[in-house]
Amino acid sequence: MSAKFFPTNGHLLVCQNGTCQRLGSPLLFQALWKYLERENLAYYKKGGTLRLTQSGCLGACGYGPTLCVYRQRGGQLEEAWYGAVDFPLAAQIAQAVHSEADLPTERKYGPTLPNSD
């Protein structure tokens, strides 16, 4: 199936490994899923552009739940990793990815690209 049927602006991954699960990642994933559905942000909804996936360890076990974002921006792959993510921050990240705005810097960790914050 061609990508034109399901255009995406980005991909959100929520860790479901042991420590993150104990710190609430299953509830975060469910709340974020419902938010993407309700706001028509999910890639399969009309006008939606976001994919959401459960993932394994994202490397910040003591600071869970963790969330990772990948998207194309300015001809480059942009990635952002977040620790201690709560629903308001997850919704803010999702909205920024969908609208192609700058990502929040709050609770960001991990790799950065040259010329990024």
Image: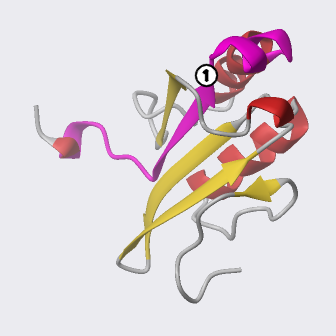
Outermost residue on the bottom side: it is 115
Where are the magenta residues, as a range?
4-24
Q: Is residue 105 left or right of residue 30?
A: right
Q: Position of residue 63 (x, y in %)?
A: 84, 36
Quarter that holds the N terminus: top left
Which residue lies at the image location 20% right of the left edge and 46% below the top edge? 4
Q: Amino acid at mark 1?
A: Glu
Which residue lies at the image location 69% right of the left edge and 70% below the top edge? 102
Quarter that holds the C terminus: bottom right
Outermost residue on the left side: it is 1
- In this figure, which residue is indicated by the disc labeled 1? 37
Residue 16: say if magenta.
yes
Q: Position of residue 11 (x, y in %)?
A: 48, 42
Q: Nearer the viewer, residue 116 or 74?
A: 116
Compared to residue 2, the image places residue 18 above or below, namely above
- Mark 1 nearby-residue class (10 Å; few <14, some 14–19, many ≥20): some
Compared to residue 33, the image places residue 10 above or below, namely below
Q: Quadrant of residue 106?
A: bottom right
